[in-house]
């Protein structure tokens, strides 16, 4: 019977295999060789040589049979794979989890948003803001955020997931500009948070559905790109507000099992700000209870 350590080691192995496939021999100063390579990217023996470990040891590591690589070995593998930033940090996190040195995220079974957080969502109006769990399920939103993401609220509460919306909702596939960069970032974020709890029922159900229904998702998921979101800029082609570009900040909420609050902003005096004001004033009035945004 597979143990939790086996599962964590396998997750590390999957990450190494996926990243190995993305490094070409010429990227690291190796000859491509004659004829077709049976697999994309580096061969196992090539990566092992670059990292200074035996081929047998690396194969056991990639297959999840070795779960306690030293920090020096992990560093060497990261350099050989040309990992940077979040991708490099993710390799170390998975290695710590595989060895039992890391602490896993708490299960996010509680989807309740604190009343104080709901008040924060209301206080930032007219700027759109919402709360998501670590797998991108929308748990609460203020009125302008609900209007910024049209169609999401037509789905049952348990299906209101931003990654699902991007790939499977007809509006979600046309709302963001460019769509391809937005979905790549969303999948990379999901990969980043998935390693600590790869067997989460919520995660496995979401990934299983999207992998079957969206070839684009399946391709991006197998790349194993990782990226922690911390803010940035997004452009929208909104069906009623028109084109607008907003910056956004992401704030982690303490003691929530991974909930995040996302707040969008528009530069003062711009057409983007005017569009946001229209989103806030249309339909519902400010006096309505924000609690209804979760229903």
Image (cartoon, helix red, strand yellow):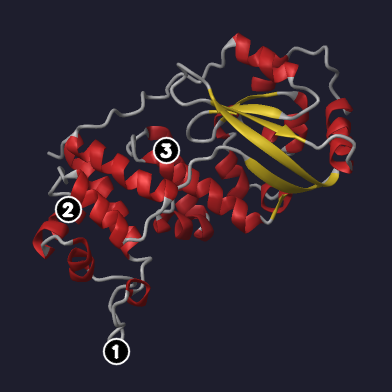
1 or 3: tag closer to the N-terminus: 1
Give me the residue at 46% from left, 42% from top.
190
Q: Is residue 212 above or below residue 94?
A: below
**Image-quadrant location for residue 280:** top right
Q: Which mark is residue 22?
A: none
- Which residue in the rendered view is the most extreme toward the top? 115
Residue density around tag 1, few if under 14, some if 14–19, many if 20 or more, within 10 Å: few
Q: Which mark is residue 61?
A: 2
Q: Which mark is residue 35?
A: 1
Q: Give the Cα separation between the discs numbered 2 and 3.
A: 21 Å
The residue pinned by badge 3 equals 193
| CB contact under 8 Å: marks 1 and 3 | no
The secondary structure type at the circle numbered 2 is helix
Q: Is residue 71 above or below residue 225?
A: above
Of 16 and 284, nearer the camera is 16
2 or 1: tag closer to the N-terminus: 1
Whether residue 55 appears in this view of the structure is: yes
- In the image: residue 20, left or right of residue 217: left
Of 44 and 25, nearer the camera is 25
Q: Is residue 124 above or below residue 235?
A: above
Residue density around tag 2, few if under 14, some if 14–19, many if 20 or more, within 10 Å: many
The secondary structure type at the circle numbered 1 is loop
**Image-quadrant location for residue 180:** bottom right
Q: Give the Cα separation between the discs numbered 1 and 3.
A: 39 Å
Give me the residue at 34% from left, 66% from top.
21
- The spot of residue 114 in percent (x, y) is 57, 12
Q: Is residue 221 above or below residue 274?
A: below
Q: Quadrant of the N terminus?
A: top left
Q: Give the Cα separation between the discs numbered 2 and 1.
A: 28 Å
């Amino acid at each position: 019977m597979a143990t939790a350590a086996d599962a964590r080691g396998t997750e590390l192995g999957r990450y190494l295999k996926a990243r190995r496939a993305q490094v070409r021999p010429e990227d690291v100063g190796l000859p491509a060789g004659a004829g077709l390579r049976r697999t994309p990217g580096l061969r196992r023996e090539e990566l092992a040589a670059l990292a200074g470990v035996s081929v047998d040891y690396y194969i056991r590591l990639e297959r999840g049979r070795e779960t306690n690589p030293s920090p020096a070995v992990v560093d060497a593998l990261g350099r050989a794979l040309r990992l940077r930033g979040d991708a490099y940090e993710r390799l170390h996190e998975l290695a710590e989890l595989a060895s039992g040195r890391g602490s896993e995220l708490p299960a996010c079974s509680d989807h309740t948003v604190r009343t104080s957080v709901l008040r924060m969502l209301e206080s930032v109006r007219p700027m759109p803001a919402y709360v998501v769990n670590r797998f991108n399920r929308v748990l609460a939103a203020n009125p302008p955020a609900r209007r910024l993401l049209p169609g999401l609220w037509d789905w049952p509460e348990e299906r209101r997931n931003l990654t699902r919306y991007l790939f499977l909702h007809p509006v979600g596939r046309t709302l963001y500009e460019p769509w391809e960069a937005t979905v790549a970032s969303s999948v990379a974020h999901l990969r980043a948070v998935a390693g600590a709890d790869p067997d989460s029922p919520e995660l496995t159900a979401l990934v299983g559905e999207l992998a079957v229904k969206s070839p684009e998702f399946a391709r991006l998921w197998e790349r194993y790109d990782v990226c922690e979101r911390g803010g940035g800029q997004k452009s929208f082609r909104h069906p009623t507000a028109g084109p607008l570009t907003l910056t956004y900040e992401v704030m982690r909420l303490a003691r929530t099992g991974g909930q995040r609050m996302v707040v969008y902003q528009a530069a003062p005096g711009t057409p983007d700000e005017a569009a946001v004001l229209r989103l806030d004033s249309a339909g519902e009035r400010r006096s309505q209870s924000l609690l209804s945004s979760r229903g």
